[in-house]
Image (cartoon, rainbow, N blue to C red):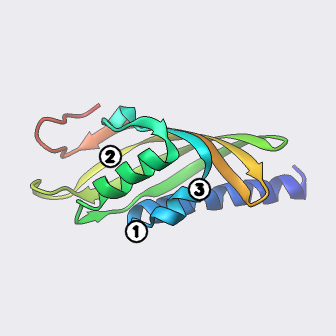
């Protein structure tokens, strides 16, 4: 693996960490900056939209602002580079406090990103969240 490949992979890892920080802090601008303007984000696995960047960013920030506590942890990041494009798979674990639910809830699964190199660095053009499990869900949600 070349030094350039290592630098690209490190920058892509940082992109995913910025995503986690943005959703946990509700930083709309930081979250928008993770994606290209015409990106498509698919959160249908958790009952969310499969839509364009701005619509999904609004949904995420609004939905997560209702939680007293949430922490997105991203790990096991695999990056398959192909020139100025890459396919990324990563695991997530999200402990959270849900309104009206006693105790801590948590969910976990996989993020599937397609990323591209832009003049401003690597950005995601497609994200699909694959939710694999949910503990202590709110009534009516159930586990995937």
Q: Quadrant of residue 120?
A: bottom right
Left of 27 or right of it: where is 4?
right
Left of 18 or right of it: where is 3?
right
Residue denoted by label 1 = 25
Question: Do we see residue 115 in this rendering?
Answer: yes
Residue at figure coordinates x 50%, y 54% from the top left:
74
Question: Of callouts 1 and 3, which one flags the residue occurring earlier in the amino acid sequence?
Answer: 1
Left of 18 or right of it: where is 27?
left
Q: Distance from label 1 to label 2 (Cα)?
A: 18 Å
Relative to residue 25, is residue 52 depicted above or below? above
The nearer-to-camera label among 1 and 2 is 1
Q: Residues within 10 Å of mark 1 (few under 14, many from 20)?
A: some
Q: Residues within 10 Å of mark 2 (few under 14, many from 20)?
A: some
Residue denoted by label 3 = 34
Q: Secondary structure at mark 2?
A: strand
Residue denoted by label 2 = 107
Question: Of callouts 2 and 3, which one flags the residue occurring earlier in the amino acid sequence?
Answer: 3
Q: Distance from label 1 to label 3 (Cα)?
A: 14 Å
């Amino acid at each position: 693996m070349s030094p350039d490949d290592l630098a690209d992979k490190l920058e892509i890892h940082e992109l995913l960490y910025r995503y986690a920080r943005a959703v946990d802090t509700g930083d709309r601008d930081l979250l928008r900056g993770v994606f290209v303007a015409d990106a498509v984000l698919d959160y249908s696995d958790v009952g969310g939209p499969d839509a364009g960047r701005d619509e999904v960013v609004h949904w995420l920030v609004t939905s997560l602002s209702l939680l007293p506590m949430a922490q997105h942890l991203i790990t096991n990041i695999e990056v398959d580079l192909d020139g100025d494009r890459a396919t990324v798979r990563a695991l997530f674990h999200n402990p959270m406090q849900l309104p009206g639910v006693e105790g801590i809830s948590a969910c976990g699964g996989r993020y599937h990103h397609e990323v591209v190199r832009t003049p401003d660095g690597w950005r995601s053009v497609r994200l699909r969240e694959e939710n694999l499990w949910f503990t202590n869900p709110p009534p009516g949600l159930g586990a995937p």
